[in-house]
Image: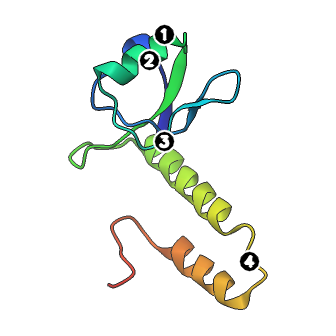
Amino acid sequence: MKKSCLIDDLEIGMIVAEEVVIADGLIVIKAGVKLDANIIEIFRKFKQSSIEIEEFIEQNASLTDEELQKLKADIAQKKKSLFKDCLEDIYMKELFRVVCDMQFGESLDG
């Protein structure tokens, strides 16, 4: 999951969820980069107001029913997006069905 975070609220160690692009199309930071003090300062210099960061759920954290339903809906949407261009193929359609049937904590190898 990702969430929008104001630059002033960024913390070292957070993970960038989406590429950060400035007005002229220059990619400042790619998705997946772990923030450090230098990167946060770059955002300030480019007057970036906020960025999307990865929001991780601690394994020991308990979710409300509403949070769990939102998480499941987000995952379902990402699965559909991943397979959207290849569902004409019967094998990809079956793979899509298998992936969509997977529950939290499952892996393909059992």
Residue type at mark 2 is Ile
- Residue at mark 2 to residue at mark 3: CA–CA distance: 15 Å
Query: Tag on residue 31?
Result: 3
Between 75 and 50, the one lying in front of the other is 50
Question: Which mark's residue is nearer the viewer, 4 or 1?
Answer: 1
Where residue 10 appears, as percent x and y from the top left, is 37, 20
Q: Nearer the viewer, mark 2 or mark 3?
A: 2
SS assignment at label 4 = loop
Please give the residue where the numbered disc 2 appears in the rendered image. 42
Name the residue carrying label 4. 87
Q: Colour scheme of this structure image?
A: rainbow
Q: Secondary structure at mark 3?
A: loop
- Of circles 3 and 1, the one toward us is 1
Of the pair 69 and 76, the residue shown nearer to us: 76
Disc 4: CA contacts within 10 A as few (<14), some (14-19) or many (>=20): some
Residue 45 disc label: 1
Kind of residue sitting beneath label 3: Ala
For discs 4 and 2, the disc positioned in front in the rendered view:
2
Q: Are marks 3 and 1 in contact (CB under 8 Å)?
A: no
Which dot, 3 or 4, sits closer to the camera?
3
Amino acid type at mark 1:
Lys
Residue 29 percent across, percent down from the top left: 49, 33
**Is residue 10 among the parts visible in the rendering?**
no
Compare residues 52 and 57 and report the one nearer the observer.
52
Mark 4 in CB contact with mark 1 (< 8 angstroms): no
